[in-house]
Amino acid sequence: MGNKMAGLKGKRISVLGAAKSGIDAANLCVKYGAKVLLSDNKPEQELRQVIGKVNPEVYLEFGGHSNKLFECDIMIVSPGVPACSEVVVNAGKHGVEVMAELEFAWRLISPAYAVAITGTNGKTTTTTLIDRIFRDAINPGQSKNMGYDNVLCAGNIGTPLSGIVEQVTESTVLIIEVSSYQLELCSTFCPKVGVLMNLTPDHLKRHGTMDRYAEIKQKVFDNHKSNGKHFAVLNYDDQYCRRVADKIDSEVLFFSCETPQKQGLWYSDSKAVGIFRDKQYEFNLSPVIPGMHNVSNILAATSVGLALGFDEKVVSKTVNTFEGVEHRIEFVRELHGVKYYNDSKATNVDSVVVALESFKKNVVLIMGGQDKGSPYKPLMGLIKNRVKSVLLIGEAARIISGELGHIVPTVMCKTLTGAVEYAHVNALPGDVVLLSPACASFDQFSDYEHRGKVFKELVNRL
């Protein structure tokens, strides 16, 4: 890593976007001698907290982008900035090398293994579980013969890859959750194992079509070779994932909740059953976390472990004791017979489907936020059968009401505070109050984690 970092000295680097990824990239570059401009089109007063996190040697510009942005050797683009945006397109016209923050950080490291998890749903749970599998394997010393001695988790799960670059050594395992936003401007990114959980309509306002969305997700495999050293873990139950298998050079392991595989892992009679490189696997699957969507997540994580040579006993113990992740159908509290659940991670319709399938009836559903361009009508059947009322918040409230308001009563609560207060007054014993927004959070919150934490604070104050 040292020589790669030394190569930053004297470089002129522009960083586009002053969110977490942009700040970490800017601070890393200036620390190693680069001349850095961090530019954001938001006004300075909205970014006061940001300024305190940025190295004082970084030049800042807010409220728009000047031509100084193009006076650089490299432009690092934060995930929130689309590749089709005017400023990114203009950078290309100026002959600037443009890359995603993920791509930039990737070029600075040489980990022992890297596992990248992407897809529309299930990424965070699967990423966390894979991270746990690797960490648990260190304890009995299994990893000593596998070439690693520490595990780092980064990416879309919270810590940008630029923020941990200095911790990555040649004996590090890197577990990275990657979104389509992070992959869009990648070109050399090449994890040893790529995991594609599923593909359903999401982020179509940005990517335009499902084909383009799928093409971007496929970038986790684009640099794989057919040399037996790269693996693709794919969901056989998803039609897009099956199509991807024919387009990549990786060694493929399918996982399925329904169908036995020639090479892969599947669920049968409460067991995980698998075949990989002529070796057969079978162990009981009795997870703590409920739902078939979590069985799918577990099979994906287990497939990664088996592909990299872990003992199935180590893997099975981990997956059967894993308790899930924050903000994903997370129980908050019960008050006066009403149970409150935080599912703020449900930023699209398919995630809400998963959440509603976890409850049979009497759901008071809190939905809304920043609309992502996908229809809400696929929820009609579940809402009709399981939901008592829908409490709407944020920018998408009227759109959701227009599509679903004729099925059950809808209430315009505007804010999350208003929705929690309404639910507290009107919910009855036996009801479930579920925050499962089906929308992005950026209209009222910094991210879904912020939204979930505010929800839990509001509920715990009741």
Image (cartoon, rainbow, N blue to C red):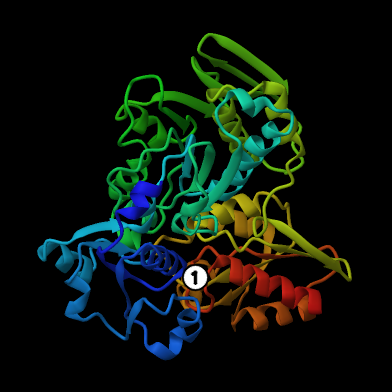
Identify the residue at image location x=60%, y=66%: 449
- Can you see residue 407? no
The image quarter in which residue 311 lies: top right
Exactly how many numbered labels are in the figure? Answer: 1
- The spot of residue 266 in percent (x, y) is 59, 24
Q: Up-down: is 15 above or below 49?
A: above
Residue 377 appears left or right of 273: left
Q: Secondary structure at mark 1?
A: helix
Q: Out of 173 and 19, give the one closest to the viewer.
A: 173
Q: Out of 312 and 398, give the one closest to the viewer.
A: 312
- Can you see residue 24? yes
The image quarter in which residue 336 lies: bottom right
How dense is the environment of label 1, judged by Cα within 10 Å: few (below 14), some, or many (20 and up)? Answer: many
Identify the residue at image location x=57%, y=50%: 124
- The spot of residue 272 in percent (x, y) is 66, 24
Identify the residue at image location x=24%, y=80%: 65
Q: Out of 14 and 400, give the one closest to the viewer.
A: 14
Q: Out of 324 and 68, give the one closest to the viewer.
A: 68
Q: Of all residues shown, which one is farthest toward the right? A: 336
Identify the residue at image location x=78%, y=73%: 427
Please state which amino acid type lies under the numbered disc 1.
Ile
Q: Of all residues shown, which one is farthest toward the top? A: 278
Residue 460 appears left or right of 85: right
- The spot of residue 412 in percent (x, y) is 58, 81
- The spot of residue 234 in percent (x, y) is 46, 32
Which residue is disc 1 drawn over? 400
- Name the quadrant of the C terminus: bottom right
